[in-house]
Image (cartoon, grey):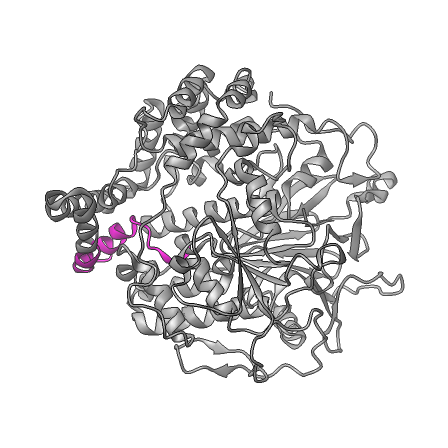
Amino acid sequence: MRWLTGWSGSPGSADPALAAVRPLAGTTLWGGPNPLWAVGDWRPDEIRLATLRPGGPATVATGARPADPADRDTPATLRMAVIGHCGASDGELAAGLAAARGGAVRHLTNWPGSYTVVLRTGVRSTVLITDLAGVQQVFHTPWCGGTAYATAALPLADLVAAPLDPDHLAAVLAAPEAPEVLGTGTPYAGVHRVPPGHTLGIRSGRPYTAGYESETSPGRWSREEAPAVRELTRALLEAVRCRVRTAAPAGPADAQERARLGVDLSYGTASATVALLAAAVPIGPAARAADPRPPAPAVRSGAVKGSWARRPAAPEQAPTEALTAVTLGESRRPALAVEVPRLRHVVLPPALPYAALADPPADPPAGPLTDEPGAALLAADALGARFRAGGTDHLTGYGARHVLDGHPARLADLIRLGRSRELLGPLAALAGADRVTAGALTGAVRTPVTVLRAAHRLARSGYAEALDDLAVTLTLRRAAEPGPTAGAGSAAALAWAVPGPAARWLSDQALAGIAQRLRIAARGGPPTELPGARRARLALHRHAAGYRTLVQAAEQHGQRLHAPFLDNQVVRAARLLPEEVRLQPGARPALLHAVLTGAGRTDLPADWGRGPRPDRAGPARTGLRLAADALAELFDRPLLAEAGLIDPGAVRRSLALAADGTAELAPGTLAGLADLIATELWLRRVAARRHGSCWTGLPPAERRALARPA
């Protein structure tokens, strides 16, 4: 795990012994009373430090360097750390730092890549900037009269000896996309999360958060499809190019086995798009050289109003170095549909979910400990094998569905905006999809009527009423089941908030506490966002958090996983697309086809990407059946039950039913069981961590492992 950490507010001044506290194996990025460290296997080009002093130009350094004791900051000195994969040149970093003197920060989120920005003014003020999707998260907690912060929650929990927070775990299981019950909490009591699209400011030790991205306004819905697709093409091309050109070489241990760059064809059309774009870009030198050129003025691209082109690059050479393309148990042809000589294909046998638990002797506490639970814990071994077969820099299509597809609740937004006519296209497309899967009557008549009624109901419903309804639904255990067809699934999603798939197994006490939180939240003011825009944003945040857990659980040492679709600029470009286009079934393959055509790939068939979706229920049930004994032992005395969160008997009955391949399951059962199993595995690993800490210099009384849930 790689992370940043520091504090603000001179926390060591109260006790001289605390001045020696620092993270284990941490590299100092800047010192003083408000220090900043980088911990983990950061590459030199992933740490870029810029400094601006009064009366002088901004300077930019790449890589961590020893702090100079004589280098003292004045109250007007401005420092910036850009940590992660950032495609900005040194000149652009210097210009961005100079523009941040007045307090503006949004322009610092416009560069390609996925990164965290830390700004420090003098010795009194620190600002950390998250990304829009939620991959680059920031956490904070009070400590010794100041505020400690980090890009991972577990180190802060170590620092303050925070116990687990069972109420937060219950909220995640019951309503994972409802901020009314989640708040800013984490699985650790007293450790808080900064929402995506926000900044964490710390002034004189006191934290505050503020949003840097303006909320979606109805005016931008008038954007046309063609310029929006051009902007999406530009953003995705930059996201892929900046990673390919700076791909790192393989280490000495695996130089003969691992390529510099790999692509993952296991995510369908989205990963195929990334692979085709990457195959057209030459891999650049391994190390980033300092950019001696002065910052150039922005150049209008002419493609889309408001978009700005980056400095013209030198002409690209023809790409020659091979890329490793990893596929799971299937031919490469369905995903790519064209031959790409540069790709070196590696086909791996597909792995079943829960396979690690089924292989004796299964040891649930053995395995990676992530910041929070996630479905990636159930397949960490299989994911690790896939990534080991890939490149040192491994590109994936993760996040494309949540970034490009329109959330069904957006239909209600169109009604609220007085644009009901634009529902005709999505409704007709849903009817056509259901006509194929459920028959002529359902597709032609029932689907449009059912979805239209649900959209009008959401458009009329108030926020407070919706929270009260959700509280009743949870208390009575009436789960919102996704339907078997596209139309039924869209109708079920047309709500301000819905229960999580694992809510049906929570205890009465846990559900009552969450229902009480919802009723209290209903007394507050409604959000300014439209319901569909809000649902889409929260679903993206949840998906990005799952990707973050996947990286922590399965990324190999020295390797970097990349999800270009979750970059800020790609997310912003996707929001320009007309909703009536994104809401239609099959919109994502059509959009990606248009992106590839705009990037020069004109040999794709017209129906590219429109194949049948893979069956995920069958492998999941097979995996549950093979791991039935291990899961029965796992839930014999589960920690979730000791914390008072679940009904263990009901969980065991559902596990037995799911393992029986002939029994019919309610929709959402497999997803809910996966959430419960992942949470129980994570709790076992936290409980097994009885010794050790991420920090050195802590007094013995404070240096203890995390507590079990009470």
Magenta highlight: main SS: helix
The answer to whether residue 174 is visible is no
Residue at the location (41% across, 83% down)?
A: 302
Left or right, residue 621 beside residue 242: left
Measuring from the top left, give residue 666's x and y in whole percent. Answer: 31, 28
Q: Who is closer to the viewer here, 336 or 471? A: 336
Rendered position, 363 above or below 572: above
Rendered position, 351 above or below 402: above
Residue at the location (61% across, 27% down)?
A: 364
Magenta run includes residue 522: no
Q: Who is closer to the viewer here, 372 or 73? A: 372
Q: Which of the 4 image quarters holds residue 93?
A: bottom right
Give the magenta part as a residue range.
403-426
The answer to whether residue 68 is visible is yes
Rendered position, 313 above or below 610: below
Q: Quadrant of the C terminus?
A: top right
Measuring from the top left, give residue 672's x and y in whole percent. Answer: 42, 31
Left or right, residue 262 beside residue 224: right
Magenta run includes residue 417: yes
Residue at the location (60% across, 26% down)?
A: 360
Q: Who is closer to the viewer here, 402 or 526? A: 402
Measuring from the top left, give residue 310's x and y in whole percent. Answer: 54, 78
Measuring from the top left, give residue 472's x and y in whole percent. Answer: 32, 26
Rendered position, 316 above or below 620: below
Q: Which of the 4 image quarters holds residue 560?
A: bottom right
